[in-house]
Amino acid sequence: MIAPLLDVRGVRHAALVDARGAVVTAVGEEADLGVVGAGRAVIGSLQAALGQGQWQDLLLDVEGGPLLLTPHGDQILLTAFDDVANLGRVRFAVRRLLGQG
């Protein structure tokens, strides 16, 4: 299901992670998926502080390159790519893949 993301220029890795933190499917090079759990915690804190229930995505610009976390039901799609300049292209591909755009 997520393999087409590797066709997007700059995408190195993608993984769909369930609510318990287990990998549903992954493609590309190995990545530390612990960031998904940390991302869930940050998102939960922000939702509580802002009083908002929905979120679209979260961009983390870390030393190894940018990571885009995108909700998909109770799962989170992590997409690792090479440069923040590619964010628009990556977001478009993710939304198209998930049927959001």
Image (cartoon, grey):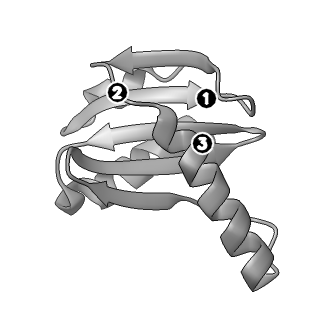
Query: Which corner quadrant holds the N terminus?
Result: top right
Mark closer to the observer (1, 3) = 3
Q: How far apart are marks 2 and 3 (CA)?
A: 13 Å
Per the image, the residue denoted by label 1 is: 17
Q: Distance between the residues labelled 1 and 3?
A: 9 Å
- Identified by mark 1, the residue type is Val
Q: Residue 31 carries which label?
A: 2
Give the residue at x 41% y 29%.
14
Give the residue at x 47% y 31%.
33
Res 21 quadrant in image:
top right
Q: How far apart are marks 1 and 2 (CA)?
A: 12 Å
Label 1 close to label 2 by CB (< 8 Å) = no
Give the residue at x 82% y 68%.
53
Q: In this view, does 77 lie to the left or right of 82?
A: right
The one nearer the camera, 15 or 5, is 15
Residue 18: x, y in percent?
70, 28
Residue 4: x, y in percent?
39, 24
Q: Which of marks 1 and 3 is nearer the N terminus?
A: 1
